[in-house]
Amino acid sequence: MILKSKSIKCLKLRIKRFVMGFKCGIVGLPNVGKSTTFNALSKGNAESSNFPFCTIDPNVGIAYVNDERLYKLVELANPKKITPAVVEFVDIAGLVKGASSGAGLGNKFLSHIRDVEVVVHIVRCFEDEDIIHSEGSVDPKRDIEIIDTELMLADLQSVENRLNKSSKQARAGDKHYKEEVTILEKIKSLLEEGKSLRTVDFAENEMELIKELRLLSSKPVIYVANVAEDELMGNEYSNIVQKIAYQEDAPMIILSSKTEEEISKLEEDEKKEFMEMLNLQESGLDKLVKTGYSMLGLMTFFTAGPKEVRGWTIKKGTKAKEAAGKIHSDIERGFIRAEIISYEDYVECKTEKQAKEKGLVRIEGKDYVMQDGDVVYFRFNV
């Protein structure tokens, strides 16, 4: 990212944090770099120490989406305040073998995963005698299998509990529960075969039940191979993670949590220089945030003016009236219309006034489906 001095000055202004509730949960075995990665993501203060269960209650932090479009709008509008779009990350304590049976407070930790939409699985891909590995050695395949097994065992318990209740209703002749029992038995069989539910294609009615039960192994996964600082291009361990991710059709990112934590503490100019020295076009964390954003099915619309340039996070397919409610409930309630300029047109015209003169401002109603990059002004009356 290359910014003009005006933009750099603007970026130093106070940025208001805004939680949208779209959560990615960071999981993995103890001492794989979860809390260090979390600290770098959110510039938070999650404790990071060389012993298991350092993180007991989940830390929650906000990571900004590094969107070039926001910075371009900043250059044009020169606002007093800048607020990027965000993704919420939850740092969940390290799981261990037997977590589904309560080992290492596992039941509590697993329950935290139920509240996230995407799982970020940090896998240790570095050797370091000073950092204890809970299993005694570095083995990405084994470590991934441990986490997957615990998620599936926890799901199996949930399915069996529901199956016991639904079977009673089915025996009483309830058609709905008969269908539910059929689905539950299918899911139970898959879990007993050791198949993570995210790797299986389900019918719509089956997915509805899976979502209702908040089954852990059904959640999409981003694999993160945490390597040593001098192995940012990957190593034999990250190659193993890449192969597993490929087989699951899951995204995979290589980063060094220590390096990313260092980068996160630098000013913009220093960050650019440091990344050039490391031959990095984009930080691993920027890739992670953008991947999480995409997997959550999110997109950004903007509001731009002299007071603030802001990226607003919404689900793809959101209509204009609902998007207005992201700014304030009164705007949604009193919605009249949305005045929209595409990002490309805004940048070409440089100001809203010029866009209006060229006839590039569209008037849209409440049922307009928002598009990624829309620059919007909502008209309302309450």
Image: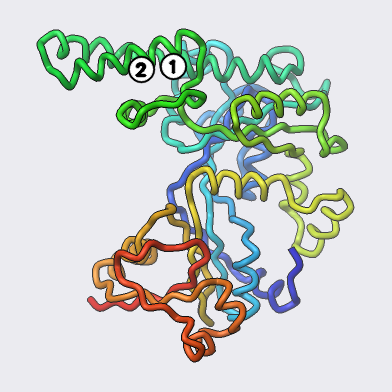
The label number, if any, that marks residue 306 in the structure image: none
Q: Amino acid at mark 2?
A: Ser
The residue under the point 86% across, 50% down is 279
Q: How many marks?
A: 2
Q: Secondary structure at mark 2?
A: helix
Query: Going by the image, does 38 lie left or right of 230?
Result: left
- How crowded pointer 2 is (Cα within 10 Å; few <14, some 14-19, many 20+) is rated as some
Whether residues under marks 2 and 1 lie with C-beta atoms below 8 angstroms apart, the answer is: yes
Measured along the vertical axis of the image, is residue 207 above or below residue 82? above
Q: Secondary structure at mark 1?
A: helix
Q: Foreground residue, 281 or 40?
A: 281
What residue is pinned by disc 2?
Answer: 158
The residue under the point 33% across, 11% down is 185
Q: Foreground residue, 213 or 329?
A: 213
- How crowded pointer 1 is (Cα within 10 Å; few <14, some 14-19, many 20+) is rated as many
| Image quadrant containing the N terminus | bottom right
The residue under the point 58% across, 29% down is 27
Measured along the vertical axis of the image, is residue 53 above or below residue 89? above
What residue is pinned by disc 1?
Answer: 154
Q: Is residue 204 visible?
A: yes
Query: Going by the image, does 52 lie left or right of 169?
Result: right
Q: Is residue 44 visible?
A: no
| Image coordinates for residue 143, horizontal then vertical, percent | 66, 18
Q: Amino acid at mark 1?
A: Ala
| Image coordinates for residue 305, horizontal then vertical, percent | 51, 80
Q: Is the image coloured rainbow, by chain, by secondary structure, or in one colour?
A: rainbow
The residue under the point 48% across, 51% down is 298
| Image coordinates for residue 193, horizontal then vertical, percent | 49, 8
